[in-house]
Image (cartoon, grey):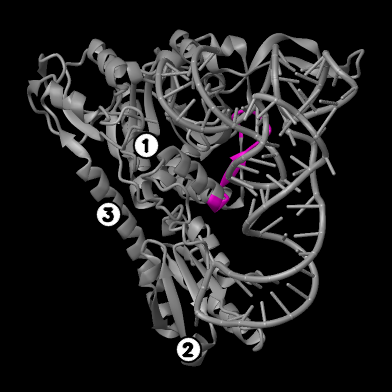
Amino acid sequence: MLGKAVKTAINPTRQEDYPEWYQQVIKAADLAEHSPVRGCMVIKPWGYALWENIQRVLDKMFKDTGHKNAYFPLFIPKSFLEKEAQHVEGFAKECAVVTHHRLQAGPDGKLIPAGELEEPLIVRPTSETIIGAMFAQWVQSYRDLPLLINQWANVVRWEMRTRLFLRTAEFLWQEGHTAHSTPREAVEETMKMLEVYSAFAQDYMAMPVIKGEKSESERFPGAVSTYSIEAMMQDRKALQAGTSHFLGQNFSHASGIKFLDSAGKEEYAWTTSWGVSTRLIGGLIMTHGDDDGIIVPPRLAPSHVVILPVLHGDEGSSGIFDYCDKLAAQLKAVQYYGRPIEAEVDKREGRGGDKVWSWIKKGIPLYLEIGPRDIASDSVFIGRRDKSRKERFGMQREEFLGKVSGILTDIQNNLFERAKAFRDSNMKIIDNKDEFYDYFTPKNKEKPETHGGFALSHWNGSAQVEEQVKKDLNVTIRCIPLDGEAESGKCVISGEKSGRRVIFAKSY
RNA sequence: CGGGAUGUAGCGCAGUCUGGUAGCGCACCUGGUUUGGGACCAGGGUGUCGGGGGUUCGAAUCCCUCCAUCCCGACCA
């Protein structure tokens, strides 16, 4: 038996210390760890398998909407970045710069950089400029448009403060870049991809999101308009989970993406870009995780079912292993949401309890404990990760094989409904300034408790109000929701006229 | 980059104030007991005390410096 003091697999609990809980969940699930390089993480197999599933699903969604994958260089000439004024201003402070192309031994035997480059190269923080330069060569005529390209890549942003998955110096993402002949078409593309992200977040990650437009101060550097999906984490802070930008003609002017229209007139193309990153995994953890670790939604789970043989020393293990192997094979023949169920038998040595808990901490949707009694009755003993360990139940093997896909669907739905109920119960319409300030101010300043949430309040549209709530409360406008209805009212801070509510929250 | 904290075995920590043989719990390895389950007994240390420099007969401990991580800001996906 484990020490009596331990009630949960993760210490501390979410309630006790949310940021520390987050770190411990990643460690317990073996998702990732810090590398010797500042701010950079090593993504371990269980975490990377999650990312691969995210990639697989999104990649299909991108292709189904007409996009094709390509790959562009890691390095961007400094002069390219300088072409778009707002863009360079937005990214200049967080760029890694390559200035030399070789090393040589110094007098003390240590390696020193040599061969200084004519023009420094920037390690891409995003690829608008290098892709724009290529687009300029690829586009001549309106017949070359639209150009719909996606890239799966790593990017580097030299952040001051990093957190695994949420903000690392290097991260994995996809960046879509498209060029169109009309602004209308480019805006449609921007909205279409926002919709793809929203569908992915909700249908696969079981993470409810709000689609909206960013205020000017939160806009991507160089964009005409930026849209995002915003999710609420369990500490009630907002996480920007994906962005889609309408870039107007800013980057086509900067990169010279020109085409002749059907009338033979030269025009600049209208471009978009959109991306999601490994940050999604951080969002997954903080949307579904509990005090026993991460809970992986079945549709993205690297493995759906683990079978744990309950071994008895005297009886030998071969009979139990045979039964488990057969069960695993039968499970793999079952389809769940368009792909075969992933099942594995955990044949590691070691005590049963340790093994079960290791899978609980990894968040596997279903764990089966199979011993002689189950074999004798041809049944399985089932634990659901979205339910308490006390709620395990038995079922005939044949019946389970018929129902397993439905159980996974039920878990997927349960996770979504649970997260949505949590978010909705922490969204509040606030029309009064005092109430607004009270909502976002912790009672205990020394050790702030979980507080706040999403405030749905009126805003007069001024950056001054944004600055004020940011300074006073560290609260920002997360987005101007797209699905909400116009409603006239008064700005919660300034009292001036407002045409609609926006979402205020603290954020990651 | 500003403020605060931390860095000692795989993990969690004590030892640092007051310098004198590197410790504890868990994990791990060996043997045994146990077995529907986060066990027990016995034995085993697997370490550049974050790195570098200094003070000293002697440094985990004192001084300088650098690095990394965490929290709160500023910046951001």
How many residues crowd around disc 3 within 10 Å: few (fewer than 14), some, or many (20 or more)? some
Pointer 1 chain: A
Residue drawn at x 25%, y 10% is A464
Q: Is label 1 in contact with label 2 (beta carbons under 8 Å)?
A: no
Please state the horizontal and vertical placement of residue A125, each as a whole percent of the image: 55, 23
Disc 1: which residue:
A193
- Residue closest to the eye, A358 or A332: A358
Residue drawn at x 36%, y 64% is A387
> Which of the 4 image quarters holds residue A43?
top right
Say whether disc 1 or disc 2 marks the residue closer to the N-terminus.
1
Q: Which quadrant: the C terminus of chain A?
A: top left
Which stretch appears magenta?
A28-40
Pointer 3 chain: A
Magenta-colored segment: predominant secondary structure: loop
Numbered circle sitting on residue A417 = 3
* A215 sits to left or right of A308: left
Q: Amino acid at mark 1?
A: Met
